[in-house]
Image (cartoon, rainbow, N blue to C red):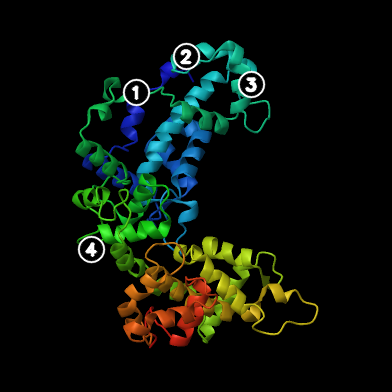
Amino acid sequence: MSITEIDWESIGAKLPYERSQEAFQERNKLFDQMDPNGNGYLSLAEVDNGLQDILQIKEIFDAKPAILRAFQAAKNYLPANAGTPDRDYVQRKEFRILLQFLRHYFELWIMFDSLDTGEDRHINLGEFQNAIPKLADWGVLVEESKAEDLFNKIDNNDGGQVLFAEFCTWAIKQKLDLGEEDNDGEMPELSMTVEERIKNTFSRYDVDGNGVITPDELQSLFSALDPDLNENEVKQIIAVSDANKDGVIDFKEFVDWLFSRKGGGKAGVLTEKQRQEAAVSVIDWDRIAAELPYERTDEAKAKRSKLFSQFDPNCNGYLSLAEVDKGMRDILRIDDLFHAKPAIMRAFQDAKNAVPSAEGSPGEEYIQRKEFRIFLQTLRHYFELWVMFQKIDAEGDHRINLDEFKAMREQLTDWGASMPDEDSEETVFNEIDSNHGGEVLFPEFCRWAIKQKLDLGEEDE
């Protein structure tokens, strides 16, 4: 299809991905039309049918590789809720992203198709060299003498041909633009005030364009603003920055967080007090308990058996530490537990060999099926201790010093620890520090905490 034959204005009007109330309402109506089951999810087939029967955009419908790449990019763009089929579908809150990706990848498909003169869905070196003037029109200058070297870089699987996926990876870096140009080619961000730039950043992460940023969108926002933040830190920032505790962050709260310097560091770094307050508040104890069925009931036993089989891809009746770790991430999808590596390690060590292994079995370095309940229970227990440990560890260096221990005296008492008078605190600290390194490590804290029977989580009935 010739580039000049594309009615970009018509296609843009049928893909309402703009951040406006009018586009938001149009998207909602369009999603409902494309979701005949009314389950809140779109399959690839439903998207395909929607482009043909509802939007009636024949150009995109015929560009199957563009549809597939847009669908793959949009699904799982936002975190999925536990137990939902989100992994293979586009959620309603990802629909705006899908529409924008469709427009973006269709544009790249038209570029690719215009270079692919052989119409065999790949570009060879000769086609690439012949397309140098066309690439220049799109804003990419390629020297003829260096065309082959560039072609080989784009062809990252060394197949001698550039496929659409490889072209997309390269083209996105070049920021090629074939369709209509926004704002008459101007770059308004250059003349923006600081407040306008912040508002622009804030609005970009309102993914569904409804004017409200949700916790899932905030996760993406904070991670993008500071890639060094891990997921637990992001959760803590959300808990602290949501001043009115309404579950979303408005513009004022966002600005207060962004320019906070109370901790003496860069924007977004929590103060010690904020970190202590947020560390436990972001833990969903009910969900964690529900995902770790260690109770002695028939229902829990059946759930455990199914869970073990999911963790055990080899079906050999044993779980390695790597399989447990993968299960935390891919099956249970409990981010808090997955990032608490010391808790997983201690629970694994305690559970393996809790029950004698049959002679000649590999059970000594693995968790057997009959030890799985013990593992789940100890994992829940050590995760609770890990959260306590992090809360005391105000500096975040994975060890507790004497000053941190003293500062948490009141909190430790609230958790049930039998604390000595202030004059004896250093003596107790030195007893906990069993290797006499001057700092308390997590294993040392666990040994002491278990004797104290500390309790941080929800209370059993």
Residue found farthest to the front: 423
Left or right of 332? Residue 422 is left
Residue found farthest to the right: 360
Q: Depth-wise, is mark 4 or mark 1 nearer the camera?
A: 4
**Mark positioned earlier in the residue sequence (3 or 2):** 3
**Mark positioned earlier in the residue sequence (3 or 4):** 3
266 or 10, nearer to the observer: 266
The residue beneath circle 2 is: 136
Q: Secondary structure at mark 3?
A: loop
Which disc, if any, is residue 180? Answer: 1
Can I make out residue 74 in this image? yes
Q: Residue at x 57, y 70 (%)?
A: 345
The residue beneath circle 3 is: 124
C-alpha distance separating marks 3 and 4: 57 Å
Q: Residue at x 33, y 54 (%)?
A: 269
**Which residue type does callout 3 highlight?**
Asn
Q: Position of residue 281 (x, y in %)?
A: 32, 69
Which disc, if any, is residue 325? Answer: none
**Which residue type does callout 2 highlight?**
Ala
Q: How would you rate the neighbour count of disc 2 (Cα within 10 Å): few for under 14, some for 14-19, many for 20 or more?
A: few
C-alpha distance separating marks 1 and 3: 28 Å
C-alpha distance separating marks 2 and 4: 52 Å
Q: Depth-wise, is mark 2 or mark 4 nearer the camera?
A: 4
C-alpha distance separating marks 2 and 1: 17 Å
